[in-house]
Image: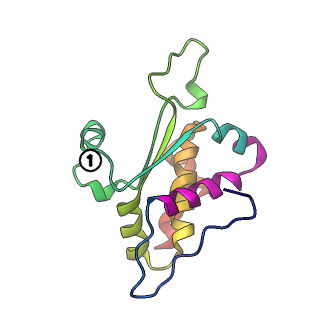
Amino acid sequence: MAETEQTPEVTTDDNALPPDLAQIEAIAFETVAALPPAFRVLAGQVAITVMDFAPEDLLAEIGIEDPFELTGLYTGIPMTEKSTMDQANAPDTVWLFRRPILDEWVMRGNVTLRQMVSHVTVHEFAHHFGWSDDDIATIDPWWEMD
């Protein structure tokens, strides 16, 4: 996507279709492009995959029964744990799950879709950079937006 292009804002028209996978992905890439330069370069080495829901085997692996409970996930080896000896079985990936993101966005009612997708994207990239959930919560107290 060209730097001057913007993802169209999602309309609140009752006849509008919900944002599709490509729109969620475009917001995620715009979020990465807006990161500070050092983080942007490192984030550029991570795949972004957008799906409607997490695959059942992945949910089972992490112990989640309700697919609506998982808006995003980072899979890979965090940068703080990587070694030159590591042999990656798959690329580091930030996964975004459209339907749970849309549900949380609607339930919150106080953030834009762009803010919601950006929050999930940044949260998952923070795991790539080696931050724990507690570290992220200190910097981004998202739950306080309820």
Q: Which residue is mark 1?
A: 64
Q: Is residue 90 above or below residue 63?
A: above
Task: Classify residue 20 by image quadrant.
Answer: bottom left
Secondary structure under the numbered disc 1 in the rendered image = loop
Give me the residue at 49% from left, 59% from top. Answer: 22
Measured as percent of width and height from the top left, residue 62 is found at 30, 39
Measured as percent of width and height from the top left, residue 123 is found at 54, 51
Measured as percent of width and height from the top left, residue 133 is found at 49, 47
Task: Classify residue 129 by image quadrant.
Answer: top right
Is 116 on the left or on the right of 14, as rendered?
right
Is 80 on the left or on the right of 51, as rendered?
right
Give me the residue at 57% from left, 59% from top. Answer: 26
| Dot 1 crowding, Cα within 10 Å, few <14, some 14–19, many 20+ | some
Give me the residue at 70% from left, 45% from top. Answer: 40
Q: Nearer the viewer, residue 134 or 130?
A: 130
| Residue 31 is one of the magenta-drawn residues | yes
The magenta stretch spans which residues?
22-39
Q: What scheme was used to colour the molecule?
A: rainbow
**Main SS type for the magenta part?**
helix
Q: Amino acid at mark 1?
A: Ile
Residue furthest to the top in view is: 85
Measured as percent of width and height from the top left, residue 122 is found at 58, 52
